[in-house]
């Protein structure tokens, strides 16, 4: 009877702990954070009391049947305790942030009670209040990271516990907690990058100076687009201290008479340039590598341009036009010098003004891109006056742009850079254990023809005669444009990156040059190189308007991949090029064996 009573009390205390945690969630959702923390403390006490009662049953642990049920139940209660402690860490961090927010008039009373109308809270914040929010985020980031670790442990523990007898009943009772844990983990996934990265990026605790590059994805280059504009951005406590944006040629031009590094061979051969300038600095598809070169080239050319040492740079931000389109959807149309820009017409209108329109308006070629800087300044001014709802929408757009590679970040701060790379925001080629493929195009003197190009990537694997496997990576290009001021024949130097140790067998579709420079249409050869811990194959191809062509590399898979496939387990990661949207992908993988399982799932046939 005492043992039965202890078991019953343990079950009751566990149920009370679950109820307290669920009530804490309701309190938290209504910003009664102190009440929520009290409820969580109750839950911790209840789970510990339940485990204490369960310990009284351990005198029977010598009985196998009983022990098999005590241990899973104890693990469940330990999981509930970990979940409650994680919730407390999150709530404590939220309380600190809410107290900072409550210092503003718009949020007075937000720590307890319903959330008031805060449509203009960020607009009305003083620099000191913004600094307070960034400080609260930075100080609570470690606590949130610890909470995330506890949630992960609790989820893994919950799934691994058997459901027999008493533990099965207890697990069913605690099941709602797993749903809350999953919700909490989703929230932590969203807030952790903000807490860990945002303060440092936005100039807390010290002012930051960034190189800002506008990458034109309609003229594709390895990290997302041609480096058409470059600027210096100074940020302090989430306030923009200054911004100065110029045409990249304003830096390249003064350095034309100076010694410069020799460019990669495809730039020299297909563009006819024997010096390497800032505009072509993003030749490496790995943004970490390209960012270092972009910073160095900027410093060299800025010193020549001004006659003084270039300012110290804390980091680099590269942005394609897609994020600008998202911003204009929120700001509404913006008129600059009599020209209207909106989300739908931004790219076309801007390109026309800097390529054609400036001539009719009597603007010099050196000043033709000033309109871009004026548009950027006006956009920043409007964003700084956003309502909270607009800011939250913009944050969502920015997160998607970061995930898609339309915004790339690099920081000189090693800790901040590590966090950026952990989130996948640094444009680094993925490090994977298995097969890997990424196709990198570089538009070489094709105007803005990427705006009318469609691409589809395919990858095929077949068993090779004599052992191992042969892979075929092919890109099919369709040029849907015509000969205009904006579009022409598409000239690209393409590289495919695969695991180190892969061996080129052949190339199909490669050209020596385009039909104007090589009327005879001689076939091109494939280049082979090792870079970034990988093997790459490269070749040139030109596609006339209205044409569809395919460039294909055939190679023997790296021994490490062949061994993995032969053992019956194969993993492939395909990484898309930044700035390319969402190109098509077709996989045709035949290992000479029957498929047992696949993730994502494959058709059983």
Image (cartoon, helix red, strand yellow):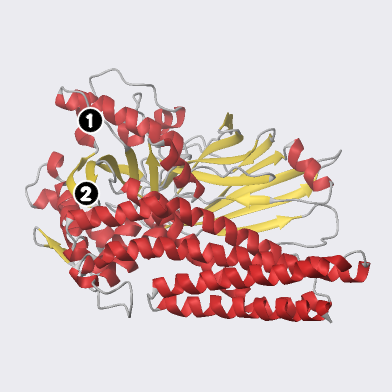
- Between 554 and 152, the residue placed more toward the observer is 152
Picture quadrant of residue 226: top left
Viewer can see residue 133: yes
Position of 409 compared to 338: left or right? right
Q: CA distance from mark 1 to mark 2?
A: 30 Å
Q: Which residue is at 60% across, 33% downward?
A: 533
The picture quadrant where one finds residue 602 is bottom right
What residue sits right under mark 2 in the picture?
355
* Mark 2 burial class by Cα count in 10 Å: few <14, some 14-19, many 20+: some
* Image spot of residue 463 (x, y percent): 81, 47
Sequence order check, earlier mark of 1 and 2: 1
Q: Residue 304, position in %: x, y?
A: 20, 23
Location of the N terminus (image quadrant): bottom right
Q: Is residue 260 left or right of residue 404?
A: left
Q: Image point 82% across, 76% down: which residue?
A: 3
Q: Secondary structure at mark 2?
A: helix
Residue 547 seen in this snapshot? no
**Farthest-out residue, top:** 259
Residue 415, given in percent of the width and then of the height, sits at: 44, 39
Q: Quadrant of the C terminus?
A: bottom right
| Coordinates of residue 219 in the picture (x, y in percent) | 36, 48
- Answer yes or no: do the residues labelled 1 and 2 have beta carbons within 8 Å? no
For label 1, the crowd category at 10 Å Cα-Cα, with few meaning under 14, some 14 to 19 and many 20 or more, is few
**Secondary element at image label 1:** loop
Horizontal relation, residue 207 to residue 600: left or right: left
Residue linked to disc 1: 311
């Amino acid at each position: 009877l005492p043992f039965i009573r202890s078991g019953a009390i343990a079950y009751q205390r566990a149920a009370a702990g679950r109820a307290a945690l669920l009530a804490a969630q309701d309190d938290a959702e209504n910003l009664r954070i102190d009440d929520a923390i009290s409820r969580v403390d109750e839950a911790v006490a209840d789970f510990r009391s339940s485990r204490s009662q369960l310990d009284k049953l351990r005198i029977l642990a010598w009985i196998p049947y009983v022990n098999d049920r005590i241990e899973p139940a104890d693990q469940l209660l330990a999981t509930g305790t970990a979940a409650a402690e994680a919730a407390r860490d999150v709530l404590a961090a939220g309380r600190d942030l809410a107290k900072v927010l409550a210092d503003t008039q718009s949020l007075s009373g937000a720590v307890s009670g319903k959330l008031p109308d805060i449509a203009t809270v960020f607009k009305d914040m003083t620099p000191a209040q913004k600094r307070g929010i960034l400080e609260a985020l930075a100080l609570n980031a470690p606590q949130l990271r610890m909470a995330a670790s506890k949630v992960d442990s609790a989820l893994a523990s919950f799934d691994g516990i058997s459901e027999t007898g008493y533990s099965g009943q207890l697990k069913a009772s605690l099941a709602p907690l797993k749903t809350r844990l999953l919700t909490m983990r989703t929230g932590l996934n969203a807030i952790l990058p903000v807490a860990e990265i945002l303060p440092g990026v936005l100039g807390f605790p010290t002012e930051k100076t960034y190189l800002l590059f506008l990458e034109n994805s309609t003229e594709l280059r390895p990290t997302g687009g041609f480096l058409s504009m470059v600027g210096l951005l100074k940020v302090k406590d989430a306030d923009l201290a200054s911004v100065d944006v110029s045409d990249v040629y304003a830096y390249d031009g003064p350095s034309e008479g100076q010694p410069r590094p020799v460019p990669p061979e495809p730039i020299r051969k297909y563009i006819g340039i024997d010096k390497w300038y800032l505009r072509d600095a993003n030749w490496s598809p790995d943004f970490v590598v390209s960012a270092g070169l972009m910073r160095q080239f900027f410093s060299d050319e800025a010193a020549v341009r001004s006659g003084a040492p270039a300012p110290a740079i804390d980091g680099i931000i590269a942005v394609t036009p897609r994020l600008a389109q998202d911003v204009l959807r929120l700001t509404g149309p913006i008129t600059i010098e009599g020209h209207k820009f909106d989300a739908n017409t931004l790219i076309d209108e801007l390109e026309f003004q800097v390529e054609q329109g400036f001539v009719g308006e009597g603007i010099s070629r050196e000043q033709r891109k000033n309109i871009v800087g004026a548009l950027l300044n006006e956009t920043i001014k409007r964003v700084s006056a956003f309502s909270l709802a607009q800011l939250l929408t913009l944050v969502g757009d920015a997160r998607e742009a970061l995930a898609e590679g339309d915004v790339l970040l690099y920081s000189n701060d090693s800790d901040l850079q590590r966090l950026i790379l952990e989130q996948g925001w640094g444009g680094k080629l993925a490090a994977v254990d298995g097969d890997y493929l990424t196709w990198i195009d570089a538009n070489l003197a094709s105007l803005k023809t990427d705006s009318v190009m469609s691409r589809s990537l395919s990858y095929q694997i077949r068993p090779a005669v004599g052992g191992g496997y042969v892979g075929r990576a092919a890109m099919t290009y369709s040029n849907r444009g015509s000969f205009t001021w904006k579009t022409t024949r598409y000239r690209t130097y393409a590289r495919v990156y695969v695991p180190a140790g892969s061996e080129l067998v052949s190339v199909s579709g490669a050209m020596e040059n385009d039909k104007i420079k090589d009327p005879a249409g001689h076939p091109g050869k494939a280049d082979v190189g090792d870079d970034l811990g990988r093997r790459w194959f490269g070749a040139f191809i030109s596609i006339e308007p209205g044409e569809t062509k395919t460039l294909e590399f055939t190679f023997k898979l790296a021994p490490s991949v062949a061994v993995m496939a032969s053992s019956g387990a194969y993993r492939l990661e395909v990484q898309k090029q930044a700035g390319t949207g969402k190109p098509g992908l077709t996989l045709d993988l035949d290992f000479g064996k029957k498929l047992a399982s696949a993730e994502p799932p494959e058709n059983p046939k």
